Amino acid sequence: MYKILFGAGSTLIVAECRKATWFPSRVVPEVSGNMSLFNVCSWWSAQCSDPGEEYDVASLLCARFGLESQEKDYIIVGSQTGQLSIYYPHRRGYDATDLLLETQMVAPIIGLYAGKFSGNVRNENTNQLGVLLPNAIVIYNVLAIGGLADHGAQLRLQVQAEHKFQRVSFGLCQGHFGQVKGREFFCVVHLDGTLTFYEQDGISYECRFPGHRALPAPVAYCERTDSFFRFSATWDLQCFSYQDLSHSLVTKSSYQPTWTQCVGEGIVDMRVVQVKENCSYIMILGERNFISLDDNGKFNFMLKLDYAPKCFTSFVVGYYWEPGARLISAIISDSSKLHLYEEANIIWAAQWPNQSPAPVAIQRSNVQNLAGGIVTLGAKGQLEVGYLGADPFQFQVQPLNVEELSFAQAHKELQQLEDEIKEAVDVRDMDALNQQAADQVRLSFSIQTEAIDDLDTLLLDVPADVAVKELPSAKGLLRCKIKAELAELQLVFQTPNGVRCSQDTLSFVDVKAGTSKEFKLDFYIAELLHIHSTKVEVVASFLSTRGIPRVIQQSANLPLSMFYRVCQPQKAAGIKLTYSITSRHVTPKLATFFGEFLEEQSDAHALGLQLLCPGLEKQSEIITVVAAKNSNRLRIQSDYVETFAMILERIVERTLHLDSSAGLIKMDKKKPKRGVLNRCVERLMAAPFLPAQPILHRIDVHHETQQSIRKQTDQLEDLWQQFKTLQRQLQEQSEGEPKEALTMQIESNYDQLILEGDKLVEIRRDERKQRCDLNCAVALAKWIIHALNLEERVVNVVNSVLSVPIEDWTELSWEESMAPGIDMLHHFGPLTRSKSTSTHGLLDANAGTRDSFDYSRFRRHFATLFDRIVRLASSPVAVYPEKATEEPSTEEKPPATQQVDEIENMQRMLGEKGLPLAPPKRKTNMSSSLEAVEDDEEYDEEDLREDVGYRKEYGATDQKNPSNKKRSEWVNEDFELPTTEELFSDLGIWW
């Protein structure tokens, strides 16, 4: 066993050996812990009272206070929580009597320092303890209290002086400023680069470094040249004499650094060590290099490190006035390795076996019975005293496995490994994988169908503007049963915008098999926004013990009574929709869909619902649902687009659920094929109408708000650049120049900056509301298209493009992200303008790839998309595909008077005049494959004007010969196309 210690002589002390072999290379590369040849031997260790990560490089101090004649070093530790501890190791291994003092400061401890900070210190060996706090430095006299009987000695702190300052401190620099003998001064380095000097007789003054504001970095003092070394914001090491700093405040004169050297990187720590009688070295530990300069600014060496350094210390072995004095530096890497250098040559490398993570502070100390020990402090308070020992790693070669190889056993193990790999990465059979994941984690998620009014708004931290409205809430229950052992499990609840869950995320680690958990949940309205959906999804993401990730999800719907209340039905409305219940398993009654508001046996044919959120004071957002008495039709009408989404979601999903519960094949089990009609029509069919203008109006408002946000952001950026420029001008002014005008400009600019920032916050708040309104509008279009009589692939493609909820990004708005999808639907696919793929069409399609976003083009394509969807759904081929090519039947058809009477009865209930039941049939030459709707001139003029027929004539007509059946052109007097309202009205669609 060899021990290598740092003695007080001119050479290293090598115990129990006569010769040591040093590593000849300049850099020792990082190796793993098991490959390290030597380890740092632990001699004494302790855990500080604060186990959190509250320690850094300034939290460790090894010093003597002159309390006894044969005194050794004390180890002082201070945490950033204010915990101060003083240790005095007596022997190998920690003992309770080694802790001499433990106290709590009133503020975090920034740094610890020892020196003669007071002028009344008579004993030359006596030092005082300086504790640097954020806004003060306290000087303590350390007093010893002898122990009684078996009790050990103790220490007590006596306040000698306390200096408070206005600026926040960063560090402290001490020394014999001005080369004064017998007295020691100190200066406090503040975060803004200001230095505050304190002398022993109470005199204090401040000074600033010239140039730009300094980064918070250490400031070191060199006693030989009476200079300060400062690391600037431009990564330069600057030298300033104490005389220039002390006289700058008195003479008001500007001064420049004595010399400047570019370091070129950030530094971790910096120390000044006097190596020779006529020279001192500045040791700098950078982020990637270890640098040494002399006190005149000349580089001694720059050593590139191939590891990330954490901390270092430099010291002289021997006395600096002796010729054989040696400069030793110890650097600790982030992998807990100690590298020992003699100037630029590495002489030792050792692994710290029990330090993980790496220490954050290191010092050399002479403790009792161990001279030249290495003291380290970890980030979590692991204090350790060690020494370098030649204790090599005992590598033992494992014995060879001479057992006979069994090919059958090896093949079985290989098959098991292949099965595990296939189970983890094979995604060809997703149904089997999903079923397996559902078997491993079984979820049961449900929400009560009745809303409650006794929500604890204080416990759930509901905003005041929402709590004052006393809106209803809902309760949910999630049961989770784990069938297999899991490494991690996370449950996330996804709610629509404006709705919040009492527990958004639940995380578990090391979940045992057979575990059952039950969570009671509260769902409540947290923001006064328009809500587009009642669906709440719970997503379970888990990781098996073999590292295989899986995700399963379940959903449930919130009750409509949480968002609506019953009111008087409206007789007239601006937007009217019609749904026909075509499934024989669903009773077309209002009680079937709205059980929260009507009893099951209720025969009501009209239901009025008022939207509770956002609860506007000036207007009541009411939606009316009417069921025909003698048919299977439902009419939904309202003046506000935002009221439709949740109602249509309930009608469509309830119809599909009841029909699927009756034993029919689920819709999602079939893959859509070309020419196959939307299977939802077999259960529910919507009238071919889309309220394009209200939806486009929401898009316009949202786009204008996005433009306002960008304009306001640019204005804020300009103001911020002006503010920084004015601040820089203020810093560059000398002390004698007037600053009143520049100060007023800065204050005015700052006030304008705050004002414009408040405007941006208000615009973003409005943008969030408008985004929710647009969510409701897009969701309305999706639920209508979902039940239109179209090809199923058309419905799927359009619904995938019209995704909700919409999202806006910093550099890309929703309109810009939607433009490529809408543009592709406009030029290609079943909704294209023409079947021909001419070069002109391709060039027009590629026009959307230009850098600038053309909103007018996007809006035009959006409106055209809705128009084509409605016209395609209104065609006779779409309505009666099986009869498109059949001969006219000679069978008797039932009279249509009964159906007309039913609609008239429904209209009479609302007090309206009768409207046409459906658009008249028109002849067409389209095939039954439901290809693209032709928008060429021949189809538009002949089919729309002749077969459909407008009740209004656009353009000039022959007034003299009214019997002349010559058709007018499809333009009016101003050569404009008919408006969308006129087109829908003439087609007989309810508007």
Image (cartoon, grey):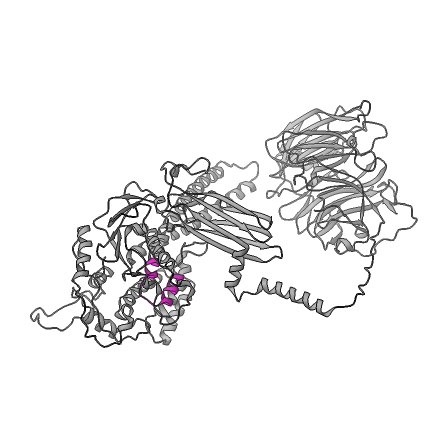
Q: Give the range drawn in magenta.
A: 781-800
Whether residue 783 appears in magenta in the rendering, the answer is: yes
The answer to which image quadrant residue 226 occupies is top right
Q: In this view, does 831 lie above or below 276?
A: below
Q: Main secondary structure of the magenta part?
A: helix
| Quadrant of residue 425 within the rendered picture | bottom right
| Residue 489 pos. (x, y %) | 56, 50
Where is residue 313? Give x, y as percent.
76, 44
- Residue 659 position, x and y percent, is 35, 59
Asked if 755 appears above or below 394 in the picture, the reply is above
Q: Observer-nearest residue: 240 or 816?
A: 816
Give coordinates of residue 86: x percent, y percent.
74, 32
Residues 640 and 27: in front is 640
Establish if 404 lies above or below 697. Answer: below
Q: In the rendered view, does 553 fall on the left or right side of 223?
A: left
* Number of marks in picture: 0
Task: Using the rendered image of the protein, determine whether residue 282 is visible from the camera's viewpoint.
Answer: yes
Is-magenta flag for residue 423? no
Residue that appears at 17% across and 58% down: 901
Task: Determine the residue located farthest toward the top in the rendered image.
Answer: 148
Locate the C terminus by quadrant.
bottom left
The outermost residue toward the left is 960
Specify whether 36 is left or right of 594: right
Q: Is residue 279 visible?
A: no
Looking at the image, residue 517 sits to the left or right of residue 216; the answer is left
**Of residues 751 and 65, the one drawn nearer to the viewer in this rendering:** 65
